[in-house]
Image (cartoon, rainbow, N blue to C red):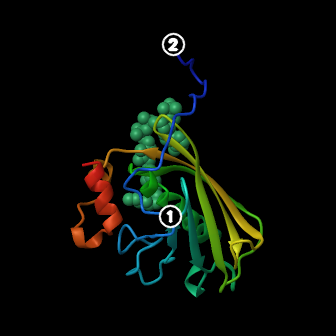
């Protein structure tokens, strides 16, 4: 085997759906009740919802409210970026490995008014070592509506201790079933 030269891209690695992944069509529960992206207990969070798709895909929704405005009546770009981070991050439940956002690029194609529901389709494109390359599109008010926002990301697989080493220990009651399952798979 020839050694990889400095700066040379890695060859793509196989990446598969984990056998314990949520079934296609099932909801991927919020991983943390106070998450600003998906937590049901967050008072002004995005309350993003996500459903597992076939293969390494998910479909999410985010409804823009007054709490998410930048210009009056329009979604703040950072909030839209957050919605994409959340939906793309949900793909890790299909892979069954903890990972964090290393790089996120967001392309804003149309203004997104308050009251809009963005339908966000996201997929894993490929993996190279610990890097997982993903992409997503957000469509206005329907799964086949016009594309308002598109994004691509690189998530980096981390040890499960990443979250407690850098964050804080969490009580089991703060986590979703899905989060507990990943902790089980990757103790
Ligand atoms: C429980 C689920 C929660 C989900 C919440 C939604 C997702 C989030 O918002 S996560 C929060 C935001 N993200 C973060 O806080 C991450 C902060 N950054 C870090 O902790 C570290 O920089 C981390 C872990 C990403 C990488 O550090 P480290 O483990 O030392 O990686 P390192 O060994 O240098 O690099 C590994 C590979 O990743 C690549 N890489 C590292 N950082 C990046 C980056 N930012 N962008 C692209 N590639 C990167 C490296 O080039 C290397 O690639 P290769 O193997 O081809 O040479």
Q: Is mark 2 within 8 Å of ligand 1?
A: no
Which residue position holds label 1? Answer: 24
Q: Is residue 164 visible?
A: no
User: Which is more foreground, mark 1 or mark 2?
Assistant: 1
Q: Which residue is mark 2?
A: 1
Residue at x 66% of width, y 84% of height: 114
**Residue 90 % position (x, y):** 48, 61
| Vertical arrangement, residue 3 with respect to residue 15, above or below | above
Percent x, y for residue 165?
A: 27, 50
Kindly identify the residue that appears in the image at 60 percent across and 64 percent down.
81
Closer to us: 110 or 21: 21
In this rendering, does residue 131 appear at all? yes
Q: Residue at x 49, y 78 (%)?
A: 47
* In this picture, residue 46 sits left or right of residue 141: left
Q: Kindly indicate the quadrant of the structure image that contains residue 6.
A: top right
At mark 1, the secondary structure is loop
Looking at marks 1 and 2 on the same chain, the residue that comes earlier in the sequence is marked by 2
Camera-side residue of 13 and 70? 13
- Residue 148 lies left or right of residue 163; in this view the side is right
Q: Mark 2, residues whose alpha carbon is within 10 Å: few (<14), some, or many (≥20)?
A: few
**Is 18 situated above or below 39?**
above
Residue shown at 35% from the left, 69% from the top: 32
Tell me which corner region of the image, top left, top right, bottom left or bottom right, holds residue 54. Answer: bottom right
Q: CA distance from mark 1 to mark 2?
A: 38 Å
Which percent across, then down, holds residue 123?
Answer: 59, 54
Disc 2, SS = loop
Find residue 3 and report its horizontal and vertical position in percent: 52, 14
Q: Quadrant of residue 115?
A: bottom right
């Amino acid at each position: 085997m020839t050694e990889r030269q400095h700066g040379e891209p890695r060859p793509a690695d196989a990446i598969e759906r984990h056998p314990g992944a949520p079934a296609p069509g099932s909801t991927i529960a919020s991983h943390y009740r106070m998450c600003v992206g998906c937590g049901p207990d967050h008072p002004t969070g995005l309350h993003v919802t996500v459903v597992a798709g076939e293969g390494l895909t998910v479909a999410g929704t985010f409804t823009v409210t007054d709490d998410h405005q930048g210009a009056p009546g329009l979604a703040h770009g950072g909030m839209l970026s957050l919605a994409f981070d959340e939906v793309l991050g949900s793909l890790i439940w299909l892979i069954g490995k903890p990972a964090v956002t290393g790089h996120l690029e967001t392309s804003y194609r149309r203004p997104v008014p308050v009251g809009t529901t963005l339908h966000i389709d996201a997929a894993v494109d490929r993996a190279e070592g610990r890097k997982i390359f993903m992409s997503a599109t957000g469509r206005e008010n329907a799964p086949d509506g016009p594309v308002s926002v598109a994004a691509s990301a690189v998530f980096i697989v981390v040890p499960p201790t990443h979250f407690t080493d850098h964050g804080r220990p969490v009580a089991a009651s703060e986590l979703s079933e899905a989060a507990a399952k990943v902790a089980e798979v990757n103790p």
